[in-house]
Image (cartoon, grey):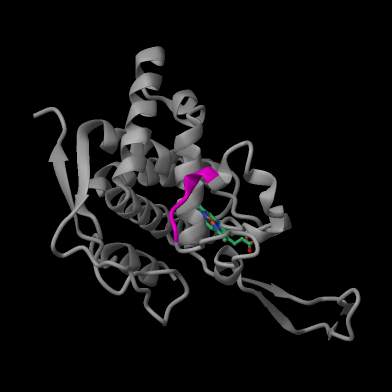
Amino acid sequence: FGGPVFDFSRSGPEPQSVSCRPLVYRVVIYHFLFNIYYFAFFTDGTTVLGIAAQFFVAGYETVSTTLSFGLYELALNQEIQRKLKDELRNALKEDGELDYGTVHKIPYLDQVVKETLRKYPILPYLDRHCTKEYRIPDSDLVLYPGSTVYIPMFGLHYDEKYFPNPNGFIPERFSTENKDNFPATAYLPFGLGPRICIGERFALTSTKLAIAKLLLEYDIEPCEETPIPVEFKASGITLVPTKKLMLKFKNSHN
Ligand code: HEM
């Protein structure tokens, strides 16, 4: 088991938007090392390795891909990028530094990340294994023990009934006034129930922190190689673009 784990971590896919990766690497690796240290006291070596593998698989590519899609949308939507920069600068002026508390209290940053995860749910479907016979209310459809049920998260996130103009990037869908316009079960980027993603808080913190740090330093724009619109690979478990999301980073202090 150890072989494949560490081969996997060495031979990861090519970076999609180069400049945002080092920060994410650092956050994910600190988190990963903390977990190994913590679990090593309570479990045997095999379990430690299993947990380490799970954190790499579930926690690494998910955050960096979300960050890439978020920066891609901010590059294509300059007005949204400007508004977010203003909010970040105001928060920085008020708090003096960008820390955990600051990134979580900027409403527009939260809306931008939530809209990124709506358009680009990294795991586009959820699956569940049926253990008890169950009739779907008001229908003849019965689920039998042993069946697998797939929940099409991508389809729900692009359903016009819940998200009008689903191809548009509209962070305001998640504002306090609008967030009740769709049922909570139509938006599931981290899943739901007892098997919900255990890394949600960590994923949101690292994505928000990385976007904030980058926007405070750079103006991000599309370049000639930027794929518009983005297309997704048809195979694979996670949502991956067919072409690299190349973007231009210009130092905003010059
Ligand atoms: C933007 C980033 C992330 C997204 C979109 C995401 C999404 C998801 C989703 C959809 C599931 C399945 C939930 C379900 O079936 O109901 C899941 C499970 C899981 N995630 Fe994440 N995840 C992210 C980041 C992370 C991070 C950073 C970690 C750990 C550091 C992590 C650890 C896990 C684990 C361990 C599970 C399995 C939980 C279980 O089966 O009980 N994820 N994630």
Describe residue 250's horizontal placement relative to residue 5 as left or right: left
**168 versus 5 height, above or below:** above
In magenta, the rendered stretch is 168-172
Quarter holding the N terminus? Answer: bottom left
**Pick the front one: 72 or 38:** 72
Q: Is residue 35 visible?
A: no
Left or right, 164 with respect to 211, comes to right
Q: Where does residue 236 sit, x and y in percent of width and height?
A: 43, 78
Which of the 4 image quadrants contains residue 206?
top left
Is residue 152 in view?
yes
Let me know if residue 169 is in the magenta part.
yes
Residue that protrudes farthest toward the left in the picture: 254
Q: Viewer-proximal residue, 77 or 217?
A: 77
Q: Which residue: 43% across, 42% down?
A: 31
Q: Tell me the quarter of the picture where residue 86 sits.
A: top left
Residue 184 percent location from the top left of the image: 70, 53
Residue 56 placed where, x, y %?
42, 57
Q: Residue at x 50, y 42 (%)?
A: 111
* Residue found 59% across the figure and 65% down from its top: 160
